[in-house]
Amino acid sequence: MSSNAVLGLLRPFMLDRFLHMLVLAGMLLFAMAPQPLAVLCDFVDWRTIVTLLGLMLLTKGVEISGYFDFIGRQIINTLRSERWLAMFLVFSAALLSSFLTNDVALFIVIPLTLTLRKLSSLPVGRLIIFQALAVNAGSLLTPIGNPQNILLWSKSSLTFMEFVGLMAPFSLVMMLSLLVLTWFSFSARSISKTPNTQVYPYQTRLLMSCVALYVVFLVCLNFDVPFYGMLVVFLCFLIMARKVLLQIDWSLIFVFIAMFIDIGLLTQLPAVQPLLTRIASLPDSSVYMLGIGLSQVISNVPATILLLSYVPSSVLVAYAVNAGGFGLAIGSLANLIALRMAGERMIWLKFHYYSLPFLAWATLVGWGMLL
């Protein structure tokens, strides 16, 4: 491997301030509550890590094939208004997240959205923010829409359609609210296309290979052997397209590993342990607010795992942790994925301009439906 390639791999780690903060926080927490290495490894949800890596590899492969450029041009030529393009992309993200999970949906729609930056003067950053909100709103509908719902469903006795029936009112209100917000947040003016944008033919062989590998990977996920699926994807790209391995955001993988370890260490603090044991005796309103609050601090998937250790799976917990996906970026892993993929420094601040009011609205709507 050349020195330039090594430098290219290391640069994201050197510039990733969020990762640096997580590492420093982890060192401080470890000093306060030391744990054996095996326990630190157990804190990490390796299924999530492996799934994330596999999806990142596949998405980067499709991106390098040039197919997103082709599709992006077709969309712009069909939907000529910024407003209708935004409505289409936001609704598509929500719909995909209901059945393919929120992270899979993002790995389909975000790279496509990013290609629009090369083809037009669209406010791509704002589009990505709304797509992040959309996958949170759409994924809460089904038991397979996001990791927290999968956990809640597995701990309940509900059928697939019974779960959907309980979540549908909340999801519908949040999705309609987001579409209304999208309508007023994007201009009705025609899309201004970037002049002299070259069109490159996409690499059919690489694209078809990615599609085939995607099927293999999803089958492995379905049979709960994600590591083997990721290994197949990794080895295939190592043989036929090493450029994919060099261009994915490896530091994002370590961000998630550091988050899991930090959260695990936080729950082991002696000062925190007595507080956790009191959760089972809390009234419904307190459990609801605790689920939302924990999501803002440790993300909604770990918050779900923690709550289910003390209270049974219920629509109350489901509404709380799904509402908690809005608000701060850390509220949902999907938010972090979307904002990292956007690659814009100021997008983190802009995201909270929309997401914090949406959290307040989701909190009110969810509690109103539970009464």
Image: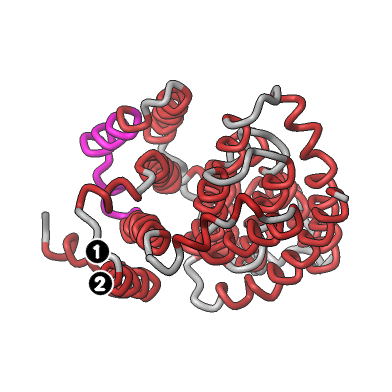
Q: Helix, strand, or loop for circle 2?
A: helix
Q: Amino acid at mark 2?
A: Ala
Residue 194 point in image, percent of width and height:
61, 66
Q: Main secondary structure of the magenta part?
A: helix
- Which residue sits at x=74%, y=52%? 284
Question: Could you say where residue 336 lies in the image, as x and y percent from the top left?
Answer: 51, 60
* Residue extent of the magenta highlight: 229-248
- Which residue occupies the foreground of this view, 79 or 271? 271
Residue visible at 56% across and 46% down in the picture:
310
User: Along the horizontal axis of the image, is 325 left or right of 316?
Assistant: left
Given contact means CB atoms under 8 Å apart, are the residues at marks 2 and 1 in contact?
Answer: yes
Asked whether the viewer can see residue 351, the reply is yes
Of residue 370 and residue 224, the one placed in the foreground of this image is 370
Numbered circle sitting on residue 31: 2
Circle 1 residues within 10 Å: few <14, some 14–19, many ≥20 = some
Question: Where is mark 1, residue-wise?
Answer: 34
